[in-house]
Image (cartoon, helix red, strand yellow):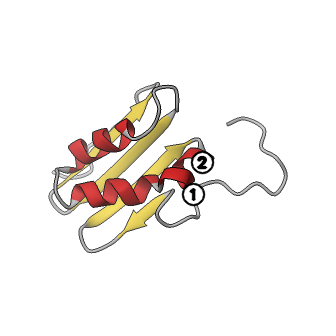
């Protein structure tokens, strides 16, 4: 986000916002922290990976946010990985073979 205000805490250290882990897998978020916190971004994607594959879960997570919100998710389960972001495509590397 460029220059941040002194003392600002983003979404990264907030469980359920910037990250979520559990028995099913893990999710990380990046983007506008205030929006990620407001919608509990990582927690929502974690809920999706309990029903959908990680790629679809990340795509569904992106859809929760307004079209002009830069946001990205990475999800990892024992069965695979997923990545989705906007407005730019985040680099992706094979994590699971």
Look at the picture and state if 4 lies above or below 37.
Answer: above
Q: Can residue 91 be seen? A: no
92 with respect to 17 (left or right)? left
Name the mark on residue 33.
Answer: 2
Name the mark on residue 12.
Answer: 1
Considering the numbered disc 2 on the image, is that residue within a helix, a strand or a loop? helix
Q: Residues within 10 Å of mark 1 (few under 14, many from 20)?
A: some
Considering the numbered disc 1 on the image, is that residue within a helix, a strand or a loop? loop
Residue shown at 24% from the left, 50% from the top: 81
Depth check: give the residue in front, 73 or 35. 35
Residue shown at 22% from the left, 42% from the top: 56
Look at the picture and state if 22 lies above or below 76.
Answer: below
54 with respect to 66 (left or right)? left
Percent x, y of residue 40: 47, 56
Residue shown at 39% from the left, 41% from the top: 64
Q: Residues within 10 Å of mark 2 (few under 14, many from 20)?
A: many
- Answer whether labels 2 and 1 touch (C-beta < 8 Å): yes
**Quadrant hosting residue 62:** top left
Depth check: give the residue in front, 88 or 57. 57
Name the mark on residue 89.
Answer: none
Q: Residue furthest bottom?
A: 23
Q: In front: mark 2 or mark 1? A: 2
């Amino acid at each position: 986000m460029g220059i941040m205000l002194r003392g600002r805490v983003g979404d990264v250290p907030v469980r359920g916002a910037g990250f979520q882990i559990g028995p099913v897998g893990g999710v990380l978020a990046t983007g506008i922290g205030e929006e990620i916190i407001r919608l509990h971004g990582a927690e929502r994607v974690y809920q999706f990976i309990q029903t959908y594959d990680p790629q679809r879960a990340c795509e569904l997570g992106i859809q929760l946010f307004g079209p002009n919100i830069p946001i990205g998710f990475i999800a990892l389960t024992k069965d695979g990985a997923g990545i989705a972001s906007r407005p730019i495509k985040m680099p992706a590397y094979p994590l699971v073979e």
